[in-house]
Amino acid sequence: MTDGFAWLEQDHRDIEEQFQTFLRDNEEPVVRAVCEHLTRHSGAEDAALYPALRRYVDDGDDLADTAQQEHAAIATIVAELYQSTTRHARVALG
């Protein structure tokens, strides 16, 4: 894919599929994979999409601000998931 927006759109679909897997199987490797994917995806949007929204789209600042607030909430959840999988691994290892 040469178009960044097409990549982001496909990545959204991939995350949705991965999240469905997470709902069926929330073992540590699956949780980590979802968290890592969400982190990479958010980073790409923060680096490329939101600056373009702010620059080229009417009301782009509002759209980007809302999306970044959502990303902040997701980042909190990701951190909690990482912490819970680490804690679970420590308990399992004794």
Image: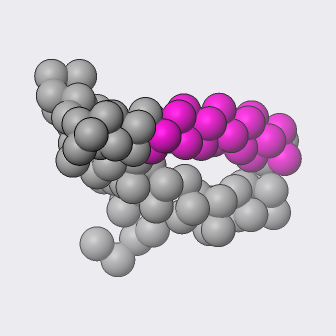
Residue furthest toward the bottom?
2
Question: In this rendering, is residue 85 above or below 32?
Answer: above
Q: Give the overall secondary structure of the magenta segment.
A: helix
Query: At 74% across and 63% down in the image, what residue appears?
Result: 51
Residue at figure coordinates x 32%, y 48% from the top left = 32
- Whether residue 11 sits left or right of residue 45 in the image: it is left
Q: In this view of the protein, which residue sits in the foreground, 59 or 75?
A: 75
Q: Which residues are magenta?
A: 61-83
Q: Horizontally, is 24 left or right of 58 in the view? A: left
Which residue lies at the image location 80% right of the left edge and 41% below the top edge? 65
Q: Residue at x 49, y 54 (%)?
A: 39
Image position, residue 55 (x, y; %): 81, 63
Residue 67 belongs to magenta span: yes
Can residue 63 be seen from the camera position used here? no
Q: How is the image coloured?
A: one colour
| 42 over 52 or under it: above or below | above
Name the residue nearer the viewer: 1 or 45.
45
User: Which quadrant holds the C terminus?
Assistant: top left
In-front residue for pair 89/50: 89
Q: Is residue 88 visible?
A: yes
